[in-house]
Amino acid sequence: MARRFPVVLLLAVLLLVGPAASTTAASTAMTIATTTATTVATTTATSAPTTLPELPDGVNSIIGPNPGQVTGPVDPDDRGGTNQLLVLGVMVLAIGGIGLLITRDVRRARSRRSDA
């Protein structure tokens, strides 16, 4: 009976971490497959001139700002802003509360079983 809680805790951690690990593995496999396909397509195709799309005025990059131009969050909705930190805090508290409720119910069930 005393080993049940660590097993349940381990399963809960695996359920939380498992999807993230499988997503990372799948994205890595997809990147490798895409890179391989691109390499094969590049080596088999004839070399054609590559032209990049023209950027609008005032835009230096398609992806995002250059590394030297990055600033901290300005608005609460920016990456790393207060709203994201608030959501993180709420999620941590919610998961911790769920863990406490599970622990409390397990302890109550054990005490009822030992009393009976």
Image (cartoon, rainbow, N blue to C red):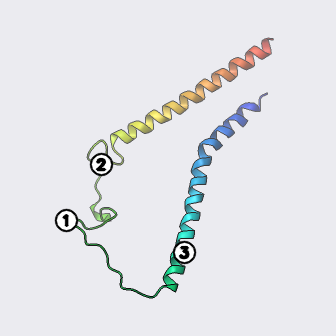
Is there a contact, CB below 8 Å, between mark 2 and mark 1?
Answer: no
Q: Residue at x 32, y 64 (%)?
A: 67
Residue 37's disc is 3
Q: Amino acid at mark 3?
A: Ala
Instruction: Report the quarter where the N terminus lies.
Output: top right
Q: Residue at x 29, y 73 (%)?
A: 53
Instruction: Give neighbour class at mark 2: few <14, some 14-19, many 20+ (Cα, 10 Å).
Output: few
Q: Residue furthest bottom?
A: 46
Instruction: Report the quarter where the C terminus lies.
Output: top right
C-alpha span from label 1 to label 3: 35 Å
Residue tagged by mark 1? 58
Q: Quadrant of residue 75?
A: top left
Q: Nearer the viewer, mark 1 or mark 3?
A: 3
Q: Position of residue 92 (x, y in %)?
A: 49, 35
Is there a contact, CB below 8 Å, between mark 1 and mark 3?
Answer: no
Residue 104's disc is none
Q: Residue at x 51, y 80 (%)?
A: 41
Q: Nearer the viewer, residue 84 or 35?
A: 35
Q: Nearer the viewer, residue 22 or 106?
A: 22
C-alpha span from label 2 to label 1: 21 Å
Q: In the drawing, does residue 4 fall left or right of residue 67?
A: right
Q: Position of residue 62 (x, y in %)?
A: 31, 65
Q: Amino acid at mark 2?
A: Pro
Residue tagged by mark 2? 73
Q: In the drawing, does residue 42 fall left or right of residue 80?
A: right
Mark 1 or mark 3: whose residue is earlier in sequence: 3
Q: Position of residue 72 (x, y in %)?
A: 30, 51
